[in-house]
Amino acid sequence: MSSDAGSFDDLLHEDRRFPPPAEFVAQAAVDAEDLHRRASEDREAYWASWAEELDWFEPWETVLEWDPPFAQWFVGGKLNVAHNCLDRHLRGSRRDKTAILWEGEPGDTRSFTYSELHKEVSAFANALRGLGVGKGDRVTIYLPMIPEAAVAMLACARIGAIHSVVFGGFSPESLADRNNDAEAKVLITADGGWRRGKVVPLKANADKAMERSPTVESVVVVRRGGELSQQVDARMKSGRDLWYHHLVEEARPECPAEVMDAEDILYILYTSGTTGKPKGVVHTTGGYLTQAYATTRAVFDLQEDDVYWCTADVGWVTGHSYIVYGPLANGATVLMYEGAPDHPDRGRFWELCQNYGVSIFYTAPTAIRAFMRWGDQWPERYDLSSLRLLGTVGEPINPEAWMWYREVVGGERCPIVDTWWQTETGAMMITPLPGHTETKPGSATRPFPGIDATILDEDGDETSSGYLAVTSPWPSMLRTVWGDEERFRATYWSKWDDVYFPGDGAKRDEDDYLWILGRVDDVLNVAGHRIGTMEVESALVEHPATAEAAVVGKKHDIKGEAIAAFVTLKEGRQGTDDLMQELRDFVGSKIGSIAKPEMVVFTADLPKTRSGKIMRRLLKDIAEGRTVGDTTTLADPAVVQRLQAQHEEKG
Ligand code: WTA
């Protein structure tokens, strides 16, 4: 956080203000003042009123039972998430409304109405049941961005199976770790997917992962179709592997939705923390859906004829809450795109916005910074007049990128919602409401109605600059870490009494606006992806040449942060450029390409305190080319001088 504090002074001088446009105020999907008033009068009744907009098989008895750190929402209530995302819309005109518009990277297209999606999900749900998957069983989903990803998630939800979606960019090893931690019974994958004109070999990765995934009994393989499936000859292992399209063809298209308790688990999603092992964040049914539903409607000002596009991958929480569950629970039309933003050229996203008439566009600051770098000519080449609202998520957005987004993409007419939240929070927590909140470039503004977020110091006292904190339970909060209650308590609930610690630093300005400064723990945010420094370190030390490794985040113009690794080698090993490349690839093969260090520095020693703790702060200073501060607590201050000299030499 120390390195961010400087730039915050600039933010404090940010005096641009953008009041909500008049049309938004006049036609807002929600009455923000009413929400705020009701939330402050009776928070539980307020959340219950959102929950009442969903279909419940049986009503709840109690809105909230809070036995810190364990919350239960809508206790005793029964519902099904897939029923709420599909069946509920079949009664009226939404039946034939488009639910999913999809475009593959090569330009192939598909679409599903709500009734078609309902049929596909029901058939696949029956197929899963046929494979012996029942309520509470875990299913891993390792798919590209194709409609079947949403179908698979909803099919699990329909039968009460717990899904664990693993981002397609993760390595076989990461996939196997997640299969094993969750003790998954079935793995759903595809022959491959397209990314920047290349095939992502998902089935081949899955096969490798299966070599050490003893709990997985069946592998369901989706045929991506088109040229890809002609190129990739997926080797199907008999008795284990099954084609998705065969299963769906043979399955009955009616499948009654399982009656789920509000607190039954909907999904596990693995995310990086401060140890080498990712944690399985657990989300349940009623509270999660309520908050995903409410925030989608209110923050995106969702109207019936909107075409909504969130550019995230379903492998991340944003894809869960804001491609699948939130939008479909609202009966929205969702655009899904398979591939990269610069394929075949840098105008692809804008071409998609134009061709599909996208009205709500939600992406990450890292993408916005890349677009900015690529130049105004790309968005300017397309008709973006259908856009009416822009959103960002995943990391702090710098005011310059925010302004560019507003002016060049949004034509100065679209409000921007900068939404702060996390895998753990399940849904948006701090965000503007577009028909209500005056925005400031770079600030996520204020908590969503019904969310109690503030800034505390180490002792738990209110301050204007310190740690972000959530002081009351919220419906979509994580319930635990899968199989590790102790880690759940220790990570999120041990800093203060009964207050949630998200791990972010924040400041409050004179208007009570919150400015999120980024992580204060050993979690990096690389191009909006969460990666633990310890995960990368554990991968590095598995390499036979490595003696010790320390990993830090280094400021990066586009990715926000890039990974810098400091490595000491075993006796007799030389720090060559080849070894550098080998180490980068090694990390890629262990975790996934997103975790490859951008910079590897070989060093004879790492700076350590006298008690042996690696001083990452100093390494960060070195990686970012800053003068190193206080080194008095170092065991051997000369280490830093050597490293710095070495780094300067390399330029
Ligand atoms: C960061 C993504 C500033 C933050 C939904 C958080 C943000 C982490 C914002 C969670 C934002 C997310 N402004 N920082 N609007 N949104 N972050 O779990 O550090 O992948 O803790 O969830 O991203 O990342 P995660």
Image (cartoon, helix red, strand yellow):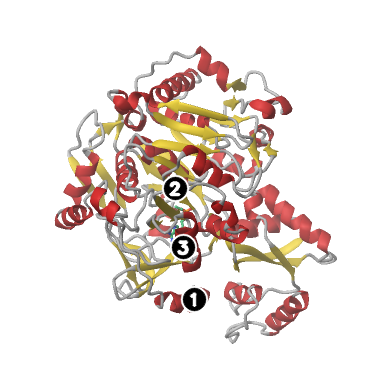
Nearer-N-terminus badge (3/1): 1
Residue 372 place in picture, x, y as percent? 57, 60
Disc number lying in front (3 or 2): 2
Q: How many marks?
A: 3
**Residue 10 vertical position relative to residue 482 in the rendered view, above or below:** below
- Comparing 144 with 548, the one in front is 144
Which residue corresponds to the image point at 38% horizontal and 52% vertical from the top-left?
A: 425
The secondary element bearing badge 2 is classed as loop
The quadrant where ligand 1 appears is: bottom left
- Comparing 191 with 106, the one in front is 106
Q: Distance between the residues labelled 2 and 1?
A: 34 Å
Q: How far apart are marks 3 and 2 (CA)?
A: 19 Å
The secondary element bearing badge 3 is classed as helix
> Does 478 sit left or right of 180 as displayed?
left
The secondary element bearing badge 1 is classed as helix
Q: Can residue 22 be seen by looking at this rendering?
A: yes
Residue type indicated by callout 2? Ser
Residue type indicated by callout 3? Trp
The C terminus lies in quadrant: bottom right
Q: In which quarter of the image is residue 305?
A: top left
Residue 182 place in picture, x, y as percent? 50, 39
**Which residue is label 3 attached to?**
402
Residue type indicated by callout 1? Ser
**Residue 145 vertical position relative to residue 569 in the rendered view, above or below:** above
Residue 39 place in picture, x, y as percent? 19, 54
**Which residue is label 2 attached to?**
385
Residue 621 place in picture, x, y as percent? 61, 77
**Which residue is label 1 attached to?**
7
